[in-house]
Amino acid sequence: MEAFQISGNSDKATDFLESIKSKNFLFSFVISYTETCEIPEITVAGAEKDLIQYTPPADAEYLHYGYCKTIERIPMTPDGKPTPGLLTKVALESSSIPHITINAGSKIAPQLPFIETGLPSGKNIYVEKSLTDSDVSHAVDYGRIVGRNLASLTDCLVIGECIPGGTTTSLAVLRALGYDARVSSSIPTNPVKLKNKVVSSALTRINSDHPYSIVAEIGDPMIPFVAGMLNSASDVTKVLLAGGTQMAAVLAFAEKIGFQDENAAIGTTSYVANDDSANFDELVKEISDIPAISVDPELDKSKFSGLKAFSEGFAKEGVGAGGCIISSMMKSGLDKTKYLENAEKEYDRLFTLP
């Protein structure tokens, strides 16, 4: 337990962690898309603008194969820093945690077996409505179906996501639901001014206080789908929402449709929890009485600049990295030293070895 930083209800955190110690975990990786990510300079989730839509399926392929099929190399920032999927893959493989991919609105389907929801991608919230109300309703219903089934297979269902531009849609949803949110970013210099401009424009279109209508107008398909998963899965098993500010938006929406809070927690990296440009810990406390658990994977000690970059503010989180590292430590007792060693081996395989 001392390996983690706890925010919120410490008693619930202790109970949650004790209940999943040495148990079985299943990681569900939800890929999605919002055209909001195509606004210049709002995200670096992809080396080039035209490649951003390939980031979610490529992350899924990398987790399964160790390489990508839809693009030549793993997703990277424009200057070559790797996807946080590297951190997730190392965590899962270090403790033999199985995973499954779910397509909940990705523009491009991954080349691997996955659960297909048939949900559409989200539109650019800066200029138009993201989804229809029926899209949001379907997303919640489909999430409930998938969550219930996956929950029956494990002691702890870990849910992560990849949706480029998702911090911006999450910010819009959180503010529309009444929270004074400041969200994190995939780059050290958070484009706060740009995000606020996009969100402010989107909020002017809100003409209903119904949560489904709010998410349809200014959200993305991932938020209602994962909230639906949490709603049903938390009736059956423990659920760890693996992510940062996007999962805070999921939690805020889930508060409107209901879930078993004694079975839920959020897990992320210390890079999100300690991000001064965001207010993650305070936000989770305001939304719900569930613990926020963060882990410092000590990537600042790495000999590779590409791994150190995560501790310096690049990416910070994504592909469920923080929650998967926590899960790996809880399942097998993996310590930070061994985790870093394994991460460096994977980085070496990807970028150094011939």
Image (cartoon, rainbow, N blue to C red):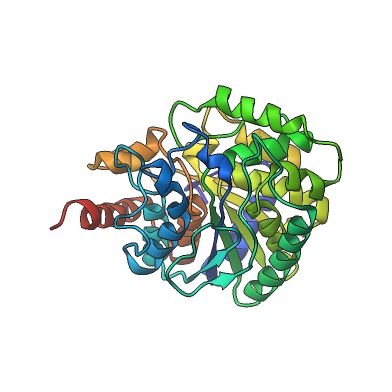
Q: Is residue 74 left or right of residue 154?
A: left
Q: Identify the residue at horizontal 40%, vertical 36% (top origin).
A: 314
Q: Is residue 265 above or below residue 219?
A: below
- x, y percent for residue 2: 50, 47
Between 66 and 156, the one nearer to me in the picture? 66
Q: Is residue 195 above or below residue 144?
A: above
Q: Is residue 58 left or right of residue 160?
A: left
Q: Is residue 352 left or right of residue 210?
A: left
Between 42 and 64, the one nearer to me in the picture? 42
Name which quarter of the figure residue 214 lies in.
top right
Q: Is residue 290 visible?
A: no
Between 208 and 160, the one nearer to me in the picture? 208
Name which quarter of the figure residue 248 lies in.
top right
Q: Identify the residue at horizontal 50%, vertical 60% (top origin).
A: 327
- x, y percent for residue 300: 33, 37
- x, y percent for residue 330: 50, 61
Q: Is residue 29 visible?
A: yes
Disc count in the image? 0
Q: Identify the residue at horizontal 35%, vertical 55% (top origin).
A: 339
Q: Identify the residue at horizontal 74%, vertical 41% (top origin).
A: 287
Q: Is residue 101 above or below residue 162?
A: below
Q: Is residue 42 above or below residue 91?
A: above
- x, y percent for residue 151: 65, 72
- Farthest residue to the left: give it: 354
Name which quarter of the figure residue 313 lies in.
top left
Quadrant (top left/top right/bottom left/bottom right) for the C terminus: bottom left
